[in-house]
Image (cartoon, coloured by chain):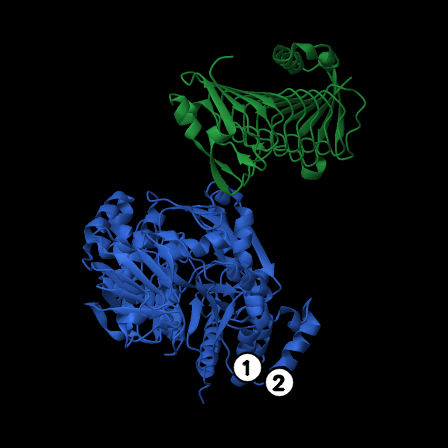
Chain colours: A blue, B green
């Protein structure tokens, strides 16, 4: 055993991974993580009486845009976001700024203040991987990882159009994961970003990308099959087609069907759950979508809840961001292509509770949360910062746990939107156990993080102690203690320790012969060589800057 | 001297954000309360009383800052009413997003005087840096109303992307004055740098000193006795009587229209 042994006694544990639902138990933490009770009580260096408190593992945000090219572009586009939200040294260990696109330091501190100890950046291009890892490396405290974007890059589309052997495509996926130091694979508007470059302004699930003759359905299936064969812990992370388009629930249902039973994660599903009924041709598709997902155990989702206020939308989906740029508030936008791999769109946006569309978006997100029967397949996100900054999570948790509070808020939004939603009829209230699943156990399980998201012996020792309060927003906003890898880092909502979190990556095996294909492609079409883009382990770990946690999945036959 | 007086006795070694220093935020407080007010200095928070001697009367809407140094930034930011008098050489972004009232600096100012100005009267007796009346951080357009007067020289890009209002510079100005001007009036009494009015769409740039040759993307439209020039001259003279003689040549002006490279219909008016 290494380091100081800490005892937390008297608290109620919520550890869904081990089926512990509010039992009073004693936890022992050291630098090794959560350890069994010591044979000798004298070995305990510090003992905390946490009677009346709620203990959970550190929170895990499975989808939050906190690093990479687009975040930096958002920071540059919105200097006022930093100008109006400075954080002086003293409030946090080091100064920072920002609300919707905060500085890296502020991101780490704010997550830790809320009891989150791991965050995953969902949109990292290979071309931007170095920048993304530099920013993630500069984000203190939290463990991190990133999903690499595929499905719109020309090489993948060429391989698929040439009807290459799925094994070759699988090797390319694995090579990209390795080169980008990524944790999973995400596809954004499959084939659509590429189609946008060839002047297509929309791409439905069975519509062909004119340049390659491929449909999103084919791309999704190839990626999902490749990931399944590689044995990656996290399934294909799908940002589907037609984001934000009224009536897109049909596309989302078709996307689920296109996967043919293969595992997949549909991300920020609220933005893909719109019907086109009613006078305004905009309605909720949440009930249909939730019903479909409840029936399909291969599908998980995160919600991407909208909360009211100023934010900025950041996405690789340049096709949809181009369409959304007309609604930018304030009126400024960045749209760009990045090394032919994907796109990028930054559109500032203000969600208003008196806007019919925005208010219904808010209600649709909550409907999805409340209609999803299996909390293990739904994760709590706002798609930071696209639906709202992650700092709104405590408010969102209260909306889920407190029906009267939810109805009070429902009464204050646009009346037509409130009338168009079934939210008022939903009586479900999430329990603390459910919240522990949504924010800890389920994301850890989905990502294959064996040492995070639970409180069993062998866990990394990320433990959050909340003071049990009827006001769940206040409770989740300001934990009493947060421990990271057995070290006390937050006391009474104030950051007092700033360890460096690990970077989680997945390294499946692949045939090295794929490098010849990649090298030939780069030599012919790209401005750099693949070795220029490849991020080495030393760049992340060197000189004690960080630590890699490598998962080596086993390829299935 | 009336109103509250803050005298800088401990000049900050590095940047002090003075955004909250205006009579409206201090009015009605006791002198002790004013001394306890927190300001952001670099990455720290400091008490106003650690840097300034506080005296005078907090019941009026007048505030005087004496001994201002270039480390004081954003003085008068958001000023909405009352009078703010400054003495010394001021730092960046004087009068940022000011909405009303009068801000009078006896001395020189750094870059960004009157960024995003929405109203009021801002006067610098000496010289000022670049970007006078330009867009505030994150804004698409520059100043939207109000008046800025610079007694002596000004740097580059005076009135860049200005939307409305009046800027008058008594001395010489740097390059790219009135660049991407959207509308509003800029009166320049001294020599001007190259690139005047580059990309301007509308608005008027008035040059009181003859001899300037506009860029090739401006078209000569003739010489005129414009009815609005006597009004402008009277207005400027009312603000600064000592400039009366220098404005005399503006009674008859040569008009250049542009910038044609941006499809602009703005005008550069040259004293004849």
Q: Residue furthest front?
A: A42
Q: Residue at x 35, y 73 (%)?
A: A445
Q: Residue at x 65, y 81 (%)?
A: A516
Q: Which residue is mark 2?
A: A513
In front: B54, or B97?
Answer: B54
Q: Residues within 10 Å of mark 1 (few under 14, many from 20)?
A: many
Task: Establish whether labels 2 and 1 are both on one chain.
Answer: yes
Q: Horizontally, is A463 left or right of A426 in the view?
A: right
Residue A414 in the image, given as x and y percentages of width and height = 29, 44
Q: Secondary structure at mark 1?
A: helix
Q: Compared to B48, does B101 lie above or below?
A: above
Q: Compared to A67, does A292 lie above or below?
A: below
User: In 3D space, how far apart are the residues under numbered discs 2 and 1 (Cα atoms)?
Assistant: 9 Å
Q: Which residue is mark 1?
A: A171
Q: Secondary structure at mark 2?
A: loop
In front: A275, or B180?
Answer: B180
Q: Compared to B131, does A445 lie above or below?
A: below
Q: Horizontally, is B32 left or right of A201 in the view?
A: left
Q: Can you see residue A289?
A: no
């Amino acid at each position: 055993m290494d380091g100081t042994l800490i005892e937390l006694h008297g608290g109620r544990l919520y550890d869904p991974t081990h089926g512990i639902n509010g039992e009073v138990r004693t936890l022992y933490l050291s630098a090794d993580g959560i350890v069994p009770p010591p044979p000798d009580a004298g070995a305990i260096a510090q003992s905390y009486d946490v009677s009346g408190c709620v203990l959970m593992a550190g929170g895990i945000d499975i989808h939050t845009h906190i690093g990479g090219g687009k975040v930096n572009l958002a920071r540059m586009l919105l200097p006022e976001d930093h100008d109006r939200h400075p954080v002086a040294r003293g409030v946090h260990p080091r100064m920072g700024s920002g609300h919707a696109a905060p500085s890296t330091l502020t991101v780490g501190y704010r997550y830790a203040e809320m009891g989150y100890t791991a965050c995953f950046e969902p949109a990292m291009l290979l071309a931007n991987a170095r920048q993304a890892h530099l920013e993630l490396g500069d984000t203190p405290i939290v463990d991190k990882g990133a999903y690499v974007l595929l499905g719109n890059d020309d090489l993948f589309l060429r391989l698929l159009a040439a009807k290459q052997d799925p094994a070759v495509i699988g090797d390319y996926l694995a090579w990209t994961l390795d080169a980008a130091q990524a944790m999973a694979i995400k596809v954004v508007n499959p084939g659509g970003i590429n189609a946008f470059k060839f002047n297509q302004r929309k791409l439905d699930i069975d519509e062909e990308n004119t340049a390659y003759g491929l449909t999103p359905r084919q791309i999704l299936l190839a990626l999902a099959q490749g990931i399944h064969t590689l044995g990656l812990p996290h399934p294909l992370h799908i940002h589907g087609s037609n984001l934000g388009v009224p009536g897109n629930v049909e596309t989302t249902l078709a996307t689920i069907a296109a996967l043919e039973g293969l595992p997949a994660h549909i991300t920020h599903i609220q933005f893909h759950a719109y019907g086109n009924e009613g006078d305004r041709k905009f309605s909720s598709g949440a009930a249909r979508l939730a019903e479909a997902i409840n029936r399909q155990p291969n599908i998980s989702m995160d919600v991407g809840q909208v909360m009211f206020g100023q934010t900025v939308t950041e996405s690789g989906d340049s096709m949809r961001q181009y369409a959304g740029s007309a609604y930018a508030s304030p009126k400024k936008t960045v749209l760009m292509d990045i090394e032919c791999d994907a796109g990028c769109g930054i559109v500032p946006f203000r969600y208003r509770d008196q806007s019919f569309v925005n208010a219904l978006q808010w209600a649709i997100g909550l409907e999805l949360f409340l209609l999803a029967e299996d909390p293990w397949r739904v994760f709590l996100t706002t798609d930071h910062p696209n639906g709202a900054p992650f700092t709104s999570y405590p408010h969102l948790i209260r909306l889920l746990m407190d029906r009267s509070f939810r109805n009070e808020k429902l009464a204050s939004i646009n009346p037509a939107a409130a009338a168009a939603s079934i939210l008022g009829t939903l009586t479900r209230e999430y329990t603390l156990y459910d919240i522990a699943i949504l924010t800890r156990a389920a994301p850890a399980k989905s990502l294959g993080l064996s040492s995070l998201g639970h409180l069993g012996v062998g866990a990394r020792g990320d433990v959050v102690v909340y003071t049990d309060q009827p006001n769940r927003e206040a409770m989740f906003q300001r934990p009493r203690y947060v421990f990271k890898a057995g070290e006390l880092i937050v006391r009474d909502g104030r950051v007092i320790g700033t360890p460096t979190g690990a970077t989680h990556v997945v390294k499946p095996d692949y045939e090295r012969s794929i490098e010849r294909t990649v090298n030939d492609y780069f030599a012919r079409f790209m401005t750099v060589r693949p070795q220029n883009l490849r991020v080495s382990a030393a760049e992340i770990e060197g000189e004690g800057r960080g630590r890699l946690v490598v998962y080596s999945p086993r390829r299935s036959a | 001297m009336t109103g509250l007086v803050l005298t800088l006795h401990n000049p900050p070694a590095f940047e002090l954000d003075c955004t909250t220093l205006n009579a409206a935020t201090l009015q009605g407080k006791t002198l002790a309360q004013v001394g306890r007010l927190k300001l952001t200095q670099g990455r720290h928070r400091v008490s106003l009383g650690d840097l300034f001697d506080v005296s005078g009367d907090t019941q009026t809407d007048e505030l005087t800052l004496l001994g201002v140094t270039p480390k004081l930034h954003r003085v008068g930011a958001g000023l909405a009413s009352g009078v703010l008098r400054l003495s010394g050489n001021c730092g960046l972004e004087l009068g940022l997003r000011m909405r009303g009232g009068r801000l009078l600096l006896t001395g020189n100012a750094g870059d960004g005087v009157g960024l995003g100005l929405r109203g009021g009267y801002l006067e610098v007796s000496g010289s000022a840096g670049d970007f006078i009346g330009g867009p505030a951080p994150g804004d698409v357009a520059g100043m939207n109303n109000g008046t800025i007067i610079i007694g002596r020289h000004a740097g580059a890009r005076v009135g860049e992307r200005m939307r409305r209002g009046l800027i008058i510079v008594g001395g010489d100005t740097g390059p790219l004055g009135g660049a991407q001007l959207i509308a509003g009036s800029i009166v320049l009494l001294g020599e001007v740098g190259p690139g005047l009015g580059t990309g301007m769409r509308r608005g008027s740039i008035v040059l009181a000193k003859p001899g300037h040759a506009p860029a090739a993307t401006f078209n000569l439209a003739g010489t005129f006795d414009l009815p609005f020039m006597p009004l402008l001259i009277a207005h400027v003279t009312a603000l600064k009587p000592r400039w009366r003689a220098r404005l005399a040549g503006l009674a008859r002006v040569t008009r250049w229209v542009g910038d044609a490279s941006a499809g602009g219909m703005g005008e550069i008016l040259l004293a004849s």
